[in-house]
Amino acid sequence: MPTRMRFTTWRQLAVVAVAALTAALLTPAAAHGTPRESRPVYSYDNAVREAVWVDTGLDGDGDGRTDRVAADIVRPREPAQQGRKIPVIMDASPYYSCCGRGNESQLKTYDADGDVVQMPLFYDNYFVPRGYAFVGVDLAGTNRSDGCVDVGGRSDIQSAKAVVDWLNGRAKGYTTRTGGKQTKATWTNGRTGMIGKSWDGTIANGVAATGVKGLKTIVPISAISTWYDYYFSEGAPLYDSGPDWLSDYVDSPDARAKCGAVQQRIVDGAPRTGDLTPFWSERDYVKAASKVRASVFLIHGMQDLNVRMQHVGPWWDALAKNGVERKIWLSQTGHVDPFDFRRTAWVDTLHRWFDHELLGYDNGIDREPMADVERHPDQWTTSKMWPPAGTAATTLRPAEGTREGVGRLGLRPGTGTETFTDDPKLSETDWAARIDTATPDKAGFTTGPLTKDLRLSGSSKVTVTATPTTSTAHLSAVLVDLGPDTIRDYGASGEGITTLTDRTCWGASTTGDSACFKETAAKTTDVDFTVVSRGWADLGNHADPGKGAPLTPGKAYTITLDLGATDHVVPAGHRLALIVAGTDKDLIDPPSTTPTLTVDLTRTSARVPFVGGIAAFARATAGSPAVAPEATRLDGVTTPRTTQRIPGEAR
């Protein structure tokens, strides 16, 4: 179980002899049977701290020699002295010197010999005393590594893969960045688990998709599964800049001086047209899911508007198709680490996951429910499978309602049309707040109040047939739970958490690396509606999701929008709504024109995954009144602003 105490620096087991004796009793061959939990029996204060530069085999910066990436290592000293080899937990990141890791933006610090003093986050403090090595890798082009950042491409992935290869005796490592003295990882058995949030977790996904031997598990937190979907959604731009801006942001000074050619290749390969080029295909890990050998413990915030939930559904489904051992946590937060929204349970679960996957302990975690879902702030439910057995997509159809501009959502095909004009000043929260009012900026459709709870689980699709008045048009589709609730305030600066002043400790500390971190609490808000899922597209991509074309004004086009995965219960008494509109302010960029779009309701529908399928929807809507409620303005979260273009940093 995790160690929990107030902010004091402490040492593990002052008497080394006791540590050695206890360690001997906790080996897998212990007389009392196979252990179920690794214990903090090794000295963190006396741990080996060293740096290795691993040859990637690439020359990304074009200086005539292959690039070496820096791997900073913290490992317990005693196992090697006892002739025992240990597994590795690894976090490969571009942020160790430029931006920091975790809620407190920690950076790596070093002593006079260049060995790491502070390793960000709690992983080394907690796991090194328990018999793991921790390795923090600087991606190529960042901090102390050679090469260039290429934003999820070959260089990024090879940065970490090469270290896994070195840990397994397949790559060369050196004691310095430029010297010729080699060093081998004789202290490890090569069994490696990768972990990390956002860009770091993305690298874990990408390395797993190479099928590299020795990588036993990955724990991607709020991670990207395909980089195209980070910048575009079916041609609609999600940010006003591309990956060249991002690579320049994290490049080390040395890389900026050498990597002009790489930067230009990024610019050329990722045009702002939204076309799916070979640049993006190289950075699509979903298509390589069949190569994944590692197990996957995936964590994501269902209101993450930085790395959006579109990165969860396709990756999860592809892993399932490949038979990968999986586990998932879905929170109500935005882009937040589980250490900051469910700390005690997170450290305990992660500990047990690594013990099972890397030490081989039969602790039962593989027989527990696959999914944990945050249903209300700090209230979690579990599912044996995810999505649950019996989940089936149901076709819902929008129809004209009893009042003009206020439509109905149900199983029967609709007739007629709805018209709206794109207004880039408005967002999904503006549309939902006026769902019961006819406004010129949206088309909205709702069920009546449900008579039974209705659970959505998985990814939805919305097919829209629309006729534009201009040559360009962007579309948004949003599913909304209409009804009062208290939820995490994902639109606020903490994206659902508040950072407190008290600290708790999770592992051992040294003078230069404290294991004590600021506590957090759920930041909540009372709302009248909750956005459940959303998706976007450029109507010009109607014929090909990967290539856009100008529209002919007055001509009808049909396109299917992929909405982000979710797991949400619409309670009895609430209503389910579908909104179709144009630019979703701060979530996609507007088109070059201001179109008015006429939606053909006979050819517009939503495919929504309900637990229990169509029968569950029919039961939940049976006897529901058909009269729309009075037109009042509803309250939601503060409109989220996603001007942040950095996967991994808070807004």
Image (spheres, rainbow, N blue to C red):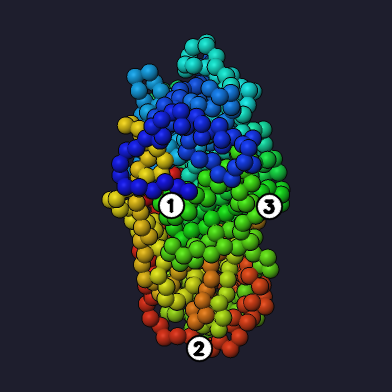
Mark 1 or mark 3, earlier in chain: 3
Q: Residue furthest top?
A: 180
Q: Secondary structure at mark 2?
A: loop
Percent of width and height locating residue 368: 62, 56
- The crowd level at tag 3 (other Cα within 10 Å; few <14, some 14-19, many 20+) is some
Q: Mark 3 sits on what residue?
A: 320
Mark 3 or mark 2, earlier in chain: 3
Question: Is 368 placed above or below 86 here?
Answer: below
Q: CA distance from mark 1 to mark 2?
A: 45 Å
| Left/right of residue 230 with respect to residue 410 in the rendered view | left
Q: Secondary structure at mark 1?
A: helix
Question: Is 273 placed above or below 555 here?
Answer: above
- The crowd level at tag 2 (other Cα within 10 Å; few <14, some 14-19, many 20+) is few
Question: Is 484 placed above or below 468 here?
Answer: below
Which residue is at 61% across, 59% downward? Answer: 369
Residue 255 is drawn in which quadrant?
Answer: top left
Q: Mark 2 sits on what residue?
A: 627
Disc 3 + disc 2, Cβ < 8 Å: no
Which residue is at 48% across, 44% downward? Answer: 197
Judged by depth in the image, the label closer to the viewer, 1 or 2, is 1
Disc 1 + disc 2, Cβ < 8 Å: no
Badge 2 amino acid: Val
Q: Which mark is residue 343?
A: 1
Percent of width and height locating residue 11: 37, 35
Q: Secondary structure at mark 3?
A: helix
Badge 3 amino acid: Ala
Q: Is residue 24 visible?
A: yes
Mark 1 or mark 2, earlier in chain: 1
Disc 1 + disc 3, Cβ < 8 Å: no
Badge 1 amino acid: Arg
| Left/right of residue 99 with respect to residue 548 in the rendered view | left
